[in-house]
Amino acid sequence: MNVSIRRTTGSEFALLTPRLVDIYIDAMDYHPSIRESRIQSWKRDLVKPGFTSVIAVTPDDVVGVAYGFLGSPEHWWDRQLRRGMREQGVPEETRDALHSGYFEVAEIHVRPGRQGNGLGRRLISELLWNAPAPRALLSTPEVDGEANGAFGLYRSLGFADVLRQFRYPGDDRPFAVLGRELPLD
């Protein structure tokens, strides 16, 4: 089936947020009880500087989403990143370089039945096209041997380790934080 990737306006993203969060819950295998809090969180992200969102759509449905914004010390994720780098002994000059400007890939998800067909690559490529920062950072759940489609995608796009085995408050799983210089090749 034909799937197109397109950018959304802020208003369209706000209207679609419940459907987009459902994709996220399915893709990440989270409990549906987090749905309302995630909807509110995603809507708050709309006002962050550099907010950009893209969706994958068929004639009948939305099947994927990616969004992000400029990283900032005022954001929760940035504070977690700084904490993790301190705890893992990342040299100060490396920390400073990462924080001199980055685009946070906050979310990228494809409906489970649609994964493995290149939609994630198309979503992240469109999201990062002309991103307003010199580098992109993202996080993904750790997987033994990096044996899943997400790690394969990120590695094929040149994302390298920033942090490994990092734990966010409220999630028992370890995560990897990955980054790369922009633009994408």
Image (tube, rainbow, N blue to C red):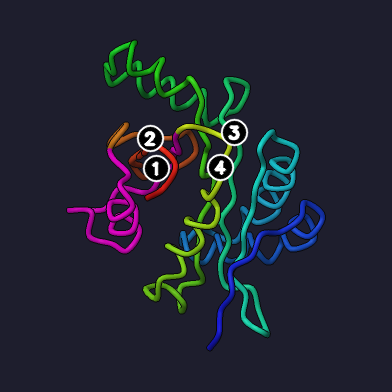
Q: Residues within 10 Å of mark 3 (few under 14, many from 20)?
A: many
Q: Earlier in the sequence, mark 1 or mark 4?
A: 4
* Of residues 139 and 122, the one drawn nearer to the viewer in this rendering: 122
Left or right, residue 152 beside residue 95: left
Cβ–Cβ under 8 Å for marks 2 and 1: yes
Cβ–Cβ under 8 Å for marks 1 and 4: no
What segment carries the magenta color? 135-160
Residue type at the position of mark 3 = Leu
* Of residues 170 and 176, the one drawn nearer to the viewer in this rendering: 176
**In the figure, 7 relative to 49: above or below?**
below
CA–CA distance in space, label 2 to label 1: 7 Å
Cβ–Cβ under 8 Å for marks 2 and 4: no
Left or right, residue 158 beside residue 34: left
Q: Earlier in the sequence, mark 2 or mark 3?
A: 3
- What residue would you read off at disc 1? 172
Whether the magenta-drawn stretch holds residue 149 is answered as yes
Badge 2 element: strand
Q: Residue at x 23, y 54 (%)?
A: 146
Badge 4 element: loop
CA–CA distance in space, label 2 to label 3: 22 Å
- What residue would you read off at disc 3? 70
- What residue would you read off at disc 4? 131
CA–CA distance in space, label 2 to label 4: 27 Å
Residue 98, given in percent of the width and then of the height, sits at 41, 24
Q: Residue at x 58, y 61 (%)?
A: 65
